[in-house]
Amino acid sequence: MASSRTGTLYAKRRLGDAVAKGFAYAAAAFGLGWLVLILAVLVFRGLDGLSLAVFTRDTPPPGSDGGLLNAIVGSIAMTVLAIAIGTPIGILAGTYLAEYGRHGKLASVVRFINDILLSAPSIVVGLFIYEVMVVPMGHFSGYAGAVALAVIVIPVVVRTTEDMLLLVPDTLREAAASIGLPRAHMIVRIAYRAARAGIVTGVLLAVARISGETAPLLFTALNNQFWSLNMNAPMPSLPVVIFQFALSPYEEWQRLAWTGALLITVSVLALSIIARTLTARRT
């Protein structure tokens, strides 16, 4: 009798396990299916307009052939400046949270604000920078666009820096203190070296995060149809060009929009692969 009940219970559990696995596999297949479909359409449509002219010619007027050179260069310039601004601030803030204020009240407030910034819509960031930079300056500029992107970079770097430093064993800190090494030297020489791969991964993820941002640049850098390296003037960028060209009725512009979307996607995927590789090596 007992063995019969045990067999029935075991069969029910196996059935429940099979049903749960079936739903899990179906959900995974559903999500991956849409991802594969999106990537397939993007590659098919993007390769159609991919040519050497995309990297050697500026964005064209309506009805003409051209490329995305000025938009690519503008995106790279603003991204580099945003990383240069946001990375030091993020690393220093993450260092404070992990090394100095780990359990303090101020650290809890900083973490809470950082979490809000992580989940805040990028268009809100763009509106904020528009009010504090564009309006006082009286014009759009690449500097304003870079600052808007830097605000998005900072919380990503803060979170990854704190998490990576917290993974460094406390025994290393205690060993450094036992030989009289100042705390600042311990952080630079030991903690940063141990967490270097993870911190670099966080910076790469931040680059991937801002690579396709359009909303903050619409309110800060706007756009420029011509070649320009003047960061104090409206600056072309790949996401904004894609947005404008995709909504246009011109076939040449739409083709370039698909190609630009493919370039951003490939760049983000490459950065994600590099970040995962660094994380695997760290592990």
Image (tube, grey):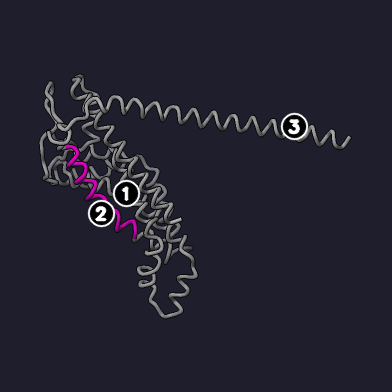
* Above-or-below relation of 18 to 249: below
Q: Which mark is nearer the camera, 1 or 3?
A: 3
Residue at position x 33%, y 56% in the image: 90
Residues 111 and 14: in front is: 14
Q: Where does residue 86 sit, x and y in percent of width and height?
A: 29, 53
Queried whether the magenta region covers residue 80, the answer comes back as yes
| Quadrant assignment, res 188 | bottom left
Dot placed on the residue nearer the N-terminal end, 1 or 3: 3
Residue at position x 51%, y 32% in the image: 28
Q: Where does residue 276 sit, x and y in percent of width and height?
A: 40, 48
Quarter of the figure with the N terminus: top right
Label 3 crowding class (10 Å Cα cut-off): few <14, some 14-19, many 20+? few
Return the residue at label 1. Answer: 153
Return the residue at label 2. Answer: 85
Q: Main secondary structure of the magenta part?
A: helix
Give the residue type at disc 3: Ala
Q: Which residues are magenta?
A: 71-91
